[in-house]
Amino acid sequence: MAYQPKHTERMYVMMGIVILVAITFLGRLFYIQVVDESYRLSADNNVLRYQVEFPARGLIYDRNGELLVFNEAAYDLMVTPRQAINIDTAEMCQILGMSREVFIQKLDEARAYSSRKPTVFQKQISGVTYANLQEKLYRMSGFFVQKRTLRKYPQPIAGHLLGYVGEASQTILEQNPYYKKGDYVGISGLEKSYENELRGRKGVRVIMVDVFNREKGRYKEGKYDTVAIAGKTLTSSIDAELQAYGERLMKNKTGAIVAIEPSTGEILALISGPTYDPNLLVGRVRSQNYSILLKDTLKPLFNRALMSEQNPPGSTFKVLNALIGQQVGVLNENTTYRCPRGYVSGKFRMGCHDHRSPLNLRESIQHSCNAYYGNVFRNIIDHTGKPWEGYAIWRDHVMSFGLGIKFNTDLPVEYAGSVPSPKFYDKYYGEHRWKSLTIISMAIGQGELGATPLQLANMTAAIANRGYYYPPHLVKAIDGKPISNRFTEKQVTTINREYFDPVVDGMAMVFQQGGTGYRSRLDSLEMCGKTGTAQNPHGEDHSIFICFAPKDNPKIALAVFVENGGGGSKYGAPIASLMVEKYLRDTISRTAFEKVILDTDLITNPPKKKEKH
Amino acid sequence: MRRQESIFAGIDWVTVILYLVLVLIGWVNIYAAVYNEEHQSILDTSQRYGKQLIWIGLSLFVAFIIMLIDGKFYSTFAIPIYVVLLGVLVIVLVTARDVSGARSWIDIGAFKLQPSEFAKSTTALALAYYLSTLNIRMEDLSTKLIAAVILIIPAALILLQNDTGSALVFGSFALVLYREGLSGNFLLFGLAMVVIFIFSLLFTPLIMLYILGTIGVLVFFFQRKKTWRLALSIGAALIVLMGMVYSVDYVFNEVLEPHQQVRIDVLLGKKDDLKGAGYNVNQSKIAIGSGGFAGKGFLKGTQTKYDFVPEQTTDFIFCTVGEEWGFLGAFLVIALFSALILRIVFVSERQKSSFTRIYGYCVASILLFHFIINVGMTIGLMPVIGIPLPFFSYGGSSLLGFTILLFIFVKLDGYRLQQLR
């Protein structure tokens, strides 16, 4: 074959093309591999999935270690819309028992939230559904099951104070980035007050998936995983047994009982009647039950113990006037007043009931004499010569017992009640154009005064302590460590210690022969109490009773408030004394007496007759 | 006799070593792409890396056989071999079953072969034989026509098998014809066609008129002699080109298959269909791009291992290189391919036999075409055309075909020295 040295130079064209191609490729590779970072993110999006591990919510115990709230496993079906492609919709609908329209609508809703992030598709699916679904789930790309916990209550008590958890609202989602759509958050009660302690901390598992979204293992051996930390355990101040008993006593009645341990301010029982079983507000049935409870005319969701603020304390308030009178020097234990069946001043008359006369300070409490306190109150208001000054002094004393203020402790909700300022009357009657007689109804705890049952219980605790209280609160310890904060700071009243003795004596005499609480006495235990009646312009008066026991070194102070229960001696005193007996003696000796209260149904048979004490 | 003691005498070890290195790296990447914990043995023939190992062994055996055969055999039997393979291609066309749209496979026992992979070698031999015949001049029209026929017959048969990618490979022989004297204008014309085709898809005919018109005016003013004849020729060229511009739409819409249209649209950025046609390229770019400078490390590539990249052992094997070995690894592979092609060109030029030289250019051109299309496609510079990366991609026919292609050249080169002795 002939050698043809033709066109040899064209080898350089060929070589040039090879080199040009190599340079182009390397430039391009350098750009997408080294310069442009976005491919790395895309790769992570492809392969990494962030699985949230939900911590167990903290448990809640009562003061004696009895379990009040625990958790039960539940399963949420989640969906990541972007990956939910080529789904056998018919099969899915059949397993979930939903129509195709609902299925598509739910998927659209999830997509509207985010197509990349997992969203709850169906909440709390049943165990059976979960079992059926699990076999098919590998074919349903984009769907997975997330384990969650549901609250459970071994006893159907304390719904109001424990509160409930629900899905985080849009507002919460916007305010707190910790919460993601579908997360649970405490909405009321202790669940809300102690949300941060109870919720624990969510964990994240970073896993790798293949193109079919099948799990392929942990990313970097779990280097970027965080462990879920369980919520803290709360020890509530509640005595579950007392709480349950109080709820039984309040059955078929509207009203409230608040019991406090005076030496600590710990709330032993907080009952609002009618109450509800907290298990009703759990899981998928919650919203349905919630709207039923919301529509109930008896307002079971309304926490009367903390929110019923417009009712006057009635005659229970006389004990405060007795203390203030002594403190400002217009009254001592031997002061006596006559009672001509009422308090009379000029044309004004404030009626009283039949009792012997005259009475001293102790007896005035025992018999709840209106005339006595008409005199005492006017002397307090007028003792400086200027009613507005006297009133301001009186008001400061009243508020030192926690009336007219909020305690701002761990209570889920709390109203301040009302102790009007002098300015209120200036506005109403004209500046300084009012005097003691104008506001005389406050002598017997009526008029513009308003106090919640909690405030009355706290006032009673302050009297039981002879001059101080601890802000009432619901939690004793967190994770076994006793709380130490402002709840444990002593709040001192403005009344000197020695002025309490005659008042406490009088309160003990309430349970003695002739006293307004005599029927509710307990022979084995010296109790101190005071009846009250809150005037109710809309119907039968409300029955009120405050009480503490034993007289020396008291262990329990409580306030009972029975709507439309009439006089304080009628329902308030019996319920209070039964609560005391239950707490201090553990067994009820007066079974017939107890039966009457338990059988009373004020809701279907509201009382008609009016009486005042 | 010295001649008999070594069939490896005069062998170009640089080419052979580059080949062996590429095959080895390719196999390592196939192993990484399909790696899973359950099948760790490299000899597990249920896995692709196990099968590929068998094909590598077979290829080396075939290479050895090629080295045993006398160098004269290839030029002597170039035409019969070519004709036999055309016959096989026809048989395939008649008997083959559809495999994902293409009818290019033939069953031989347990193995499936793709004759089109071997058609490249046989066509190269036939072309080399014809062009190296005495008194053949590239300038002659008859030479051009006969050369074209040699190329077009196998390409057409492969096109009929619905294997467009493999058919396009035959276009690479244009470089061989150029080296043998074909006017550079043919290449420039081909290049201009491609450029006009792309621009016509991107711009409206009016804009194309402006662009081409401007170029024409510039050409006119930069010529020293501004004659009427020149102006007329430029005007005529403009009219022809505009005719082409208008025909592009027709070709694009009527001649190209819908999936081919989409692939071109995706490449030109006219469509951003990341779930459909653009998915492959996008995932491929993500895999390579996420490798970074030094890569994620051997067996650490998540995109390829977890099947985000389709066809990751075959057409998109370069993704595994890019993801696990990063820019450094990609650099090495590109350098190796470039070195191999350049070496073949260099070795071809030192031949006294024009048969060997032309055959060498055929080998270099085919490898270059595969390299440009395959790597270019994985990094989004070329449309998705399903042709393998030589020596790398999983697949017995492909590896065997390229091995035969290359080692015939190695043998021919060695034979040159044997003759001299």
Image: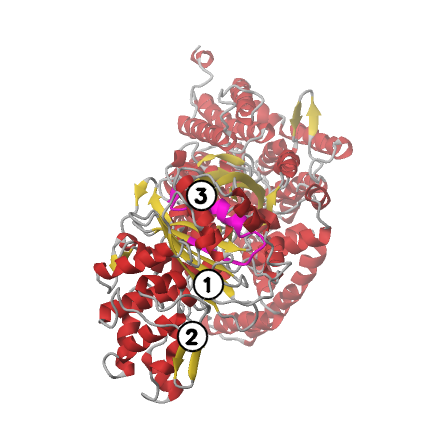
Residue A544 point in image, percent of width and height:
46, 61
Q: Marks 1 and 2, how far apart in space?
A: 33 Å
- The chain to which mark 1 is attached is A
- Left/right placement of residue B50 relative to residue A90 reads left
Residue highlighted by disc 1: A307
- Left/right placement of residue B336 relative to residue A245 reads left
Q: Secondary structure at mark 1?
A: helix
Q: Marks 3 and 1, how far apart in space?
A: 26 Å
Given contact means CB atoms under 8 Å apart, are the residues at marks 3 and 2 in contact?
A: no
Residue A411 lies in what quarter of the image? bottom left
Labels 3 and 2 in the same subunit: yes
Question: Badge 2: few (under 14), some or many (20 or more) residues near its Cα, within 10 Å?
Answer: some
Amino acid identity at mark 2: Gly
Residue at 33% across / 77% down in the picture? A421
Q: Secondary structure at mark 3?
A: helix
Residue highlighted by disc 3: A582
Above or below A395: residue B272: above
